[in-house]
Image (tube, rainbow, N blue to C red):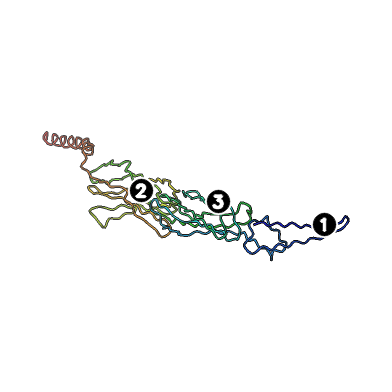
């Protein structure tokens, strides 16, 4: 409320009259910064202040699928004059946020709350993400406050591994010869981080539990969502056996996983193989016939 006074006094020409007006403003009754000009800060009656905080924070940091985080941002006028708020925020990349805007005027002691929903998708890169929320007053940008929301995405360990038997080298000179197999092994990084580890490929025999043979050992570096390819040749495999190829991927931080790669069977019951022996059989038949004819002539 603004009050005015009218002083009615006659002043003679050439006379100086001093009029002193004292105005007392009770604590908390000043309505605008521009209405007061107090030189001594210790006697200042206007308090422009604001605060922001995050409440009701619910979140599970182990991300296995699409997960949504919910939080509430509360802005409070902790001063004793009305203010108009300016609310801003920053959400890091890889995080998808829906932030309810907070705007308008806040009376002394009044609060406004807005909900924040942050969606985390599968394979969000493992890292620490910090969301920033800032508030200031329109008339006094230097009066401000901020809050942070830390989101930690833990590592998710997984990969897709497979092997293709590109060529089965069956150039057998004799039925008791052994096989050699050429294979291509591929690994696709399904983790949410770069893989920097070790690959071990081994073969087991289905009907012989004691058969466990390492055929490949190699350091690997697979970028996020990248694919790694390698080749190997397995020699000395026996006929008429079923083999299973596995891979062990060591992620180099205490985590290792085993993956099935391929299933293949080696055997000599192949018509093409027997046809390949026909020339040898004809030569042997010719030799035997020649010996038999020679002995008969004698």
* First of labels 1, 2 by sequence position: 1
Residue 241: give x, y in percent of width and height. Answer: 23, 49
Residue 291 location, x and y as percent? 16, 37
Mark 1–mark 2 CB contact (< 8 Å): no
Left or right position of 99 against 18: left
Which of the two discs, 2 and 3, labels the residue nearer the N terminus? 3
Looking at the image, is 205 positioned above or below residue 268?
below
Quadrant housing the C terminus:
top left
Residue drawn at (83%, 59%) of the image = 17
Callouts 1 and 3 close, C-beta under 8 Å: no
- Measured in 3D between alpha carbons, the distance from the residue under mark 1 to the one under mark 2, in whole angstroms, is 104 Å
Depth check, mark 2 against mark 3: the one in front is 3
**Secondary structure category for the residue under label 1:** loop
Compared across the picture, whether 129 is left or right of 289 comes to right
User: Between residues 123 and 43, which one lies in front from this camera angle?
Assistant: 43
**SS for tag 3?**
loop
Question: Which residue of the protein is positioned furthest toward the right in this rendering?
Answer: 14
Q: Which mark is residue 125?
A: none
Whole-number angstrom distance, CA of label 2 to CA of label 3 = 56 Å
Residue 143, horizontal then vertical, whole percent: 62, 57
Query: Pointer 3: what residue?
Result: 104
Q: According to the image, label 1 marks what residue?
A: 10
Left or right of 26, for residue 228:
left
Is 236 on the left or on the right of 136, as rendered? left
Residue 30, compared with residue 293, is above or below; it is below
Disc 2 is placed on an element classified as: strand
Of badges 1 and 2, the one in the foreground is: 1
């Amino acid at each position: 409320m603004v009050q005015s006074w009218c002083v009615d006094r006659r002043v003679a020409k050439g006379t100086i009259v001093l009029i002193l007006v004292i105005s007392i403003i009770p604590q908390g009754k000043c309505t605008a910064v521009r209405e007061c000009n107090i030189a001594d800060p210790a006697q200042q009656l206007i308090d422009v202040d604001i605060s922001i905080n995050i409440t009701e924070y619910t979140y599970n940091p182990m991300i296995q699928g699409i997960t949504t985080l919910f939080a509430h941002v509360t802005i409070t006028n902790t001063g004793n004059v009305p203010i108009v708020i300016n609310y801003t925020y920053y959400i890091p990349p890889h995080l998808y946020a829906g932030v309810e805007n907070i705007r308008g005027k806040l009376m002394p002691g009044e609060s406004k709350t807005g909900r924040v929903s942050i969606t985390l998708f599968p394979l969000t890169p493992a890292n620490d993400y910090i969301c920033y929320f800032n508030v200031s007053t329109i008339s006094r940008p230097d009066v401000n406050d901020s809050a942070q929301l830390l989101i930690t995405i833990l590592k998710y360990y997984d990969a897709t591994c497979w092997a293709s038997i590109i060529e089965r080298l069956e150039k057998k000179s004799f039925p008791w010869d052994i096989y050699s197999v050429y294979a291509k092994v591929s690994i696709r990084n399904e983790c949410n981080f770069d893989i920097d580890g070790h690959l071990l490929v081994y073969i087991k025999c289905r009907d012989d539990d004691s058969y466990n043979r390492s055929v490949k050992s190699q350091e690997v570096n697979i970028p996020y969502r990248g694919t790694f390819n390698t080749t190997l040749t397995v020699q000395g495999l026996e006929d008429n056996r079923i083999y299973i190829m596995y891979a062990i991927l060591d992620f180099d931080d205490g985590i290792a996983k085993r993956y099935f790669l391929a299933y293949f069977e080696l055997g000599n019951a192949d018509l093409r193989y027997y046809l390949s022996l026909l020339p040898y059989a004809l030569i042997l038949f010719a030799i035997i016939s020649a010996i038999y004819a020679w002995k008969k002539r004698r």
